[in-house]
Amino acid sequence: MEIRVLGAHNVESATSKLTSLLIDGVLVVDAGALTSSLSLSEQERVTSILLTHCHYDHVRDIAAIALNTTYFEGNIRVYAQASTLAAISDHLLNDVIYPDFTKVPAANPSLTFSPLEPHKVEDVDGYKVLAVPVKHGAATVGYQITSGEGKSFFYSGDTGPGLSSCWEHLSPHLLFIDVTLPNRLEEHAVSSNHLTPYLLGEELALFKKVKGYLPPVVPIHLSPQFEDEIKEEVGRVALELGASITVAHEGMRLSL
C-alpha cells in the first residue's frame, strides 16, 4: 500500500496545501488538495473518497473533482457519515453554489454518496475501512484503512485530546495524527479540538499503554506559520517516547 500526502496543512499558500491523502492512486482520504495536486489523468484513476467531516479544508475539492469527472464520464463514490454528506448537499452541491453532481449528468452522475457508520467495517475498493469517532467540533471520524495484504494505517482527520476510547478499536502499522499548533498555543488548540506536540505525546503514551506498542507516527494538518516550532517540539516528544515521528509534507510517500 502506497500512501501519498497531497496536502499536509490547514492553510493553503504557495508552499502549503490543505489536508488530503492518496492511497495506491485510487482511494482518497479527505479532499482539501485533491484536484490541485493531481493531473487530470491521475484524477481519472480516483474511484473513491473518504471524508472525515464537513469542514471546508477537508471537503473543498469535492466540487472540483465532480466537475472533472463529468468529462471522464466516470463515477466516484464518496463515503462519509450521513451528516457530512448532508452538509455537502445542503451547502456546496446545492444547485446554487455548484450543481448537485449526485444527479449530474443524468445518465451517469459524477458522484455517488455512501453513508458510513462508526465502528462498522466497510469494504471500499478492496480495502477494509473502519470509521472511528474522534474529538472535534463537527461530527468527525478517523479512518483505519487496511489493505488486502493486512497492512493498515489510521488517519485522525482533525482531532483534539481524549482518544482513549478510539485506541482500543485500532491496531495500525502507521498513525497520521493532527498536530495543528505549537505547545504555547495549547489553550487555543484544546478549545478548537486540535493537538499540540505535548498533547500528541500524551495521546501516544496512552496508545502504547493500551496497545502495548507504538507504530511510526506522522503529524499532519500543520499550521505552516508555526511549522518550525512544531517540528522542534515533535522531535522532543519522539526522544521522550523513543518513537519514530516524521512530520508530514506535501509529496511525501510512504509504503506499507
Image (spheres, grey):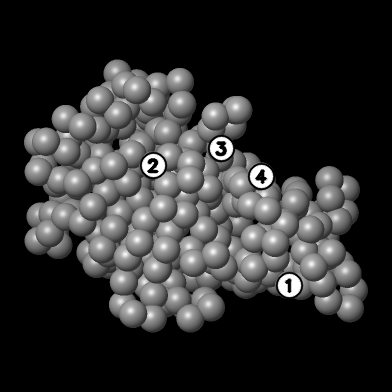
Of pointers 1 and 4, the one earlier in the residue sequence: 4
| Separation of marks 1 and 4 at Cα, in angstroms | 19 Å
250 or 116: nearer the viewer: 250
* Residue topped by disc 2: 248
Q: Amino acid at mark 1?
A: Asn
| Residue at the spot of label 3 | 17
Indicate the secondary structure of the residue bearing disc 3: loop
Q: Position of residue 5 (x, y in %)?
A: 47, 49
**Marked residue nearer the N-terminal end (1 or 2):** 1
CB of mark 4 within 8 Å of CB of mark 3? Answer: yes
The 10 Å Cα crowd at callout 4, few under 14, some 14 to 19, many 20 or more, is some
Q: Quick one: label 4 or label 2, which is nearer the N terminus?
A: 4
- Is residue 231 depicted above or below 57 in this figure? above
First of labels 4, 3 by sequence position: 3
Q: Find numbered disc 2 in the image and state the secondary structure of the residue it sits on.
A: loop
Residue at the disc numbered 4: 36
Disc 1 target residue: 75
* Figure quadrant of the N terminus: bottom left
What's the residue at 42%, 47% (across, down)? 252
Residue occupying the point 41% across, 53% down: 253
Q: SS of the residue at dot 1?
A: loop
Q: Which badge, 2 or 3, is on the more N-terminal residue?
A: 3
Name the amino acid, label 3. Answer: Lys
Q: Are marks 1 and 4 in contact (CB under 8 Å)?
A: no
